Image (spheres, rainbow, N blue to C red):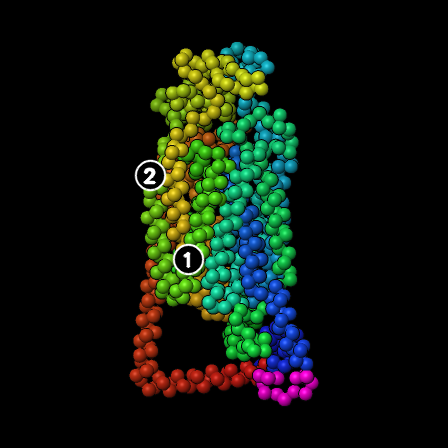
Amino acid sequence: MGLPSTKVKSNFHQNSGETRQRYLTLKMGMTGPPTTASKPSHTEEQPRRCAINPFHSIKFFVLCHGLLQLSQLLVSGYLKSIVSTIEKRFGLSSQTSGMLSSLNEIGSAVFIVFVSYFGSRVHRPRLIGCGGILVSVAAFTMALPHFIMGKYTYDRTTTNNVNNASDICHLRPQDQNLKSEICSVQESSGGYDMLSLLIVGQLLLGIGGVPIQPFGISYVDDFASNRNSPLYLGILFAVSVLGPAFGFVLGSAVLRLYVDIDKLSAADIDLEFGDPRWVGAWWLGFLMAASFVGMVSIPYFFFPKEMPKEGSRDPEGGISTDKKLNELKSKQEDVTQGLSLLQFIKSFPCILLRTLRSSVYLLVVLAQVCMSALMSGLTVFIGKFLEQQFTVTASFANLLIGSIHVPGAVLGILIGGAIMRRFQMSLRGSAIMCFAAIFASICATTPLLFLGCSTQVVAGINDNQSTLNRTFGLELSCNRGCSCKDHAYNPVCTTDGVEFVSPCHAGCMSASFETDGKVVNYANCSCVSAQTLVKPGSCGSGCYKLLLPFMIFLTLAGFVATFCQTPSFILVLRSVKPEDKSLAIGIQFMLFRVLAWLPGPVLYGSAIDTTCIQWETKCSKKAACRYYNLDLFRVRYIGLQMLFQCSAFLLFLMAYYFLKKESLRREQQTKMTTTDPRFGEERKKLMEQESETKLQLESKA
């Protein structure tokens, strides 16, 4: 059967109708009317107008797509930068916050099937623009809880008179009522009601992000030259890492502002930045990111469905006939092209198995899954890790990640793409580059297991003389008559390095205040000697001096690991048939979401929760963790990363083995073809059949 005329027109439509008619006349040997050549000025000016139009340039598309990926991943990166703040504000465990961070992958995993089906059927740029608008709506949704819920409350020592100061030890019976916890209906439900809005926003974020990267990668690879394609993909992958970097930097900026800055004046804010109870303005970054992603989504509605392939124009400004015929042939060979949506969904498992039958494709994708699982836990909890291990603020931790670690990864991606372009690496060379980069990353990650300190001594929790009952609270013999609140958290530190969760638990009966009402120190503390001073604030782990070497090794590990980003994607694109390229990318990202990005943060969060040694309670319910066993935290967090790195190394090594085996098989076939005349005759017949097929396609065109 002949191709429908509309399909032929869509494949050949690059310029105006007159230019296309002149192109077909010259190529098919038809004799046109004299008027066809009588308008040289019109036909010569048309390509110039197309060249001037930026929406017909793949370079401009790469620029726009880089900005969109930057803004989209800024939203997701920003969410990861405020994980510890959200845990504190809503009273969440690390497992719950990890689940929240990965919820956007549920919507992505469901709708990625439709992306695989519509890959070559829809207007990809416009669908990318619609996804960007939906991401903007999702970011606005995640900022709503702040405007619905009340003000942030925390334990504090306030007084107008020393005798009625709160949060200290009261031995008189009439003062015991100060220690009872009053829970409203909203407080008893915790932050889970408001958490539902964050969940909805995350689901919308996942759905909106589905078409952005797969459609963008396939669009660039389709219309970029083979020489420049690795460079463009490297730029896009670098920007995809730069987006979270800007998210962490944005988080660092807004978390320096108090959470209720829009509800309270500066004079009414008692907490100081750096206090363990401080909660930053987590909602402000969502509003800023939503506005940015909405603006950069608009240009996509002006890009064409198809554009001239870079560097493939013929003298008449068109696209070469051979390349067009190859595209027509690929579309005829695409078995999914004639299926309806329902038929595609039913046949998707078979198509999935057919695509995964390629050993190299499967091994490389599984290796990428391991690295994606590593990154999912690293990006979500690295800020929390730095806060706990080195006693830094959430703002400073985000600044370190966004300005040092992530730019190092971006540089690694760019260098990896440049190496691919400079040396024009084969598939085997790409595999070697991948497993060599992962091995170097393992070597750089190993010292991180030993760069850290133990948890500071906290009375009633991890000191040898304390008695801890995590269900009914902690109590020491020295503060037994104080009736301290189990949920109280206003840490104080003694001059000999012992920390108490509140001045009440230290047995302090009085406090000294400055003129502005801030506590200077506590006095008459029954749990410490008379000569020991008790000051507000946490003692910290005392491990700040190791922060610099830790960041150096962490950045080095990320830098060398990202060398394999571009070559691994080139391995994926070149290990499948051209007509299966969009489908293979869709399956690849589906596996990323199902096997890495969805379970990864939950796995890391669960491992972190097992290292908790004291939980916060709100209305008799377990909330966020207050103190961790830092040695266990470090070993399990870094150990999980090394486990994923070793798995990726073995998988890339196996992919190289299969590539080498396939190369040897082809060399043997080539030798047999040149020595045996029968193979020469068969090859001649195949070439004749291919020539006949080409002529048939030309006649149909």
Q: Which residue lies furthest to the front in this view?
A: 41
Q: Distance between the residues labelled 1 and 2?
A: 29 Å
Q: Quadrant of the N terminus?
A: bottom right
Q: What element carries label 1?
A: helix
Q: Where in the figure is residue 519, as x and y percent of width and height?
A: 52, 19
**Dot 2, how many residues are within 10 Å of its Cα: few (below 14), some (14-19), or many (20+)?**
few
Q: Mark 1 points at which residue?
A: 416
Residue type beneath disc 1: Gly
Q: Mark 2 points at which residue?
A: 450
Give the side of residue 287 with respect to residue 99, left or right: right
Q: Is mark 2 on a helix, strand or loop?
A: loop
Q: What residue is drawn where x is 52% and y is 49%?
A: 243
Confirm whether the magenta stretch covers residue 324.
no
In the drawing, what numbered circle is on residue 325?
none
- Residue 331's quadrant in the figure? bottom right
Q: Where in the figure is residue 381, as x and y percent of width and height?
A: 46, 41
Residue 305 visible, this angle: no
Q: What residue is drawn where x is 48% and y is 64%?
A: 229
**Dot 1, how many residues are within 10 Å of its Cα: few (below 14), some (14-19), or many (20+)?**
many
Residue type beneath disc 2: Phe
Q: Magenta stretch? A: 25-38
